[in-house]
Image: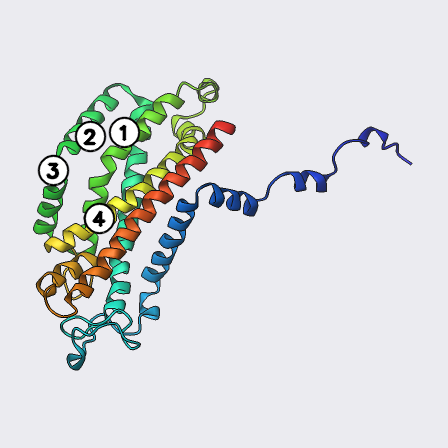
């Protein structure tokens, strides 16, 4: 029989697994350390589910009106009441989430993809490319944001794709600066210099060695930008430059409620979309803060 005395005193595999906290335990610890971020994540998840399954969850269609039941207070049939043409406010709020929240998510995905490409290339290659790219970014950041959006949407129309592209283009410039700064710090790191020293192509160095280290920063930026994107889209819709009717958005619901604030039940029409915008924007912000703390700590422990 083989002598196993050399292994005596070493921890067994089961002990090692028990000593290492699992993903569920790490998640619970993070939720305890950042309760506001955990609540924010749950609120964001709830609104995302509402946006994705609005047609299934909503008890009525967003344009289905009941002229005999206009401006009603909350009842069992209409849990958040009805508007001036008898449309169910709760149903319109769910369909509005599909526009406001999903548009914000799509716009941020576009902005972060552009920011990653421009920031990584500018920071890694430097030279004249970096100089030209950063001057163009300076000009882009100097553009008045709201006027730019109004000009683009007013010229090209307020379709979903136009609003999505305009928001994505607006948000990417500042994020590219942050990605560029992180790339500048990483491109002189030892593991990057070693990869270049053995002849690894630049594209592979960026994708395999720099991007994974910048990705946590991109994730945090994306989460923080979601709240801003929801507010910007709602502002555009409130001003009449968002997705055209009859599709509801939270900003247009607020705009429609302006003329009915003094009517009986009119205040109810403004409360719910306003609360939805506030809850989503705040939840994305606190979730971004919690993710920043989590990813920053992991990076310090395992650079």
Which of the two discs, 1 and 4, sits closer to the camera?
Answer: 4
Q: Residue at x 68, y 38 (%)?
A: 16
x%, y% of residue 273?
23, 59
Q: Decide: marks 1, 2 in contact (CB < 8 A)?
A: yes
Q: Residues within 10 Å of mark 4 (few under 14, many from 20)?
A: many
Residue occupied by mark 4: 231
The label on residue 177 is 1
Which mark is on residue 102? Answer: none
Which of the two discs, 3 and 1, labels the residue nearer the N terminus?
A: 3
In which quarter of the view is residue 148 placed? top left
Q: Looking at the image, tell me whether mark 1 or mark 2 is earlier in sequence order.
A: 2
Mark 4 to mark 2 CA distance (whole Å): 23 Å
Say which residue appears at 48% left-offset and 33% top-offset: 298
Find the residue positioned furthest to the bottom. 68
Is there a contact, CB below 8 Å, between mark 1 and mark 4? Answer: no
Give the secondary structure at mark 1: helix
Q: Are marks 3 and 4 in contact (CB under 8 Å)?
A: no
- Relative to 148, say whether 95 is above or below: below
Between disc 3 and disc 2, whose residue precedes?
A: 2
Nearer to the camera, 244 or 279: 279
> Disc 4 vs disc 2: Cβ atoms closer than 8 Å?
no
């Amino acid at each position: 029989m083989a002598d196993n005395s050399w292994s005596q005193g070493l921890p067994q595999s089961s002990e090692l697994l028990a000593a290492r906290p699992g993903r569920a335990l790490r998640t619970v610890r993070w939720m305890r350390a950042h309760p506001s971020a955990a609540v924010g994540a749950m609120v964001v998840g709830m609104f995302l589910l509402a946006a994705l399954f609005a047609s299934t969850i909503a008890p009525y269609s967003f344009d289905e009106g009941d002229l005999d039941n206009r401006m009603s207070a909350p009842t069992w049939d209409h849990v958040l009441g009805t508007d001036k043409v008898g449309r169910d406010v709760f149903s319109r709020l769910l369909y509005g989430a599909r526009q406001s929240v999903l548009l914000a998510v799509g716009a941020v995905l576009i902005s972060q993809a552009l920011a990653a490409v421009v920031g990584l290339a500018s920071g890694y290659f430097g030279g004249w490319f970096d100089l030209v790219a950063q001057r163009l970014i300076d000009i882009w950041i100097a553009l008045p944001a709201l006027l730019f959006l109004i000009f683009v949407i007013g010229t090209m129309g307020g379709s979903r794709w136009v609003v999505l592209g305009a928001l994505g283009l607006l948000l990417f410039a500042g994020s590219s600066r942050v990605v560029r700064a992180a790339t500048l710090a990483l491109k002189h790191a030892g593991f990057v210099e070693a990869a270049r020293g053995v002849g690894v192509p630049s594209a592979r160095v960026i994708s395999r060695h720099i991007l994974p280290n910048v990705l946590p920063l991109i994730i945090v930026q994306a989460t923080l930008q979601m709240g801003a994107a929801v507010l910007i889209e709602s502002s555009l819709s409130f001003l009449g430059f968002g997705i055209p009717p009859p599709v509801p958005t939270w900003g247009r619901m607020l705009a429609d409620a302006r003329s009915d604030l003094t009517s009986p039940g009119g205040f109810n029409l403004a409360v719910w979309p306003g609360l939805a915008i506030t809850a989503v924007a705040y939840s994305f912000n606190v979730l971004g803060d919690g993710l920043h703390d989590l990813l920053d700590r992991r990076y310090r422990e395992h650079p």
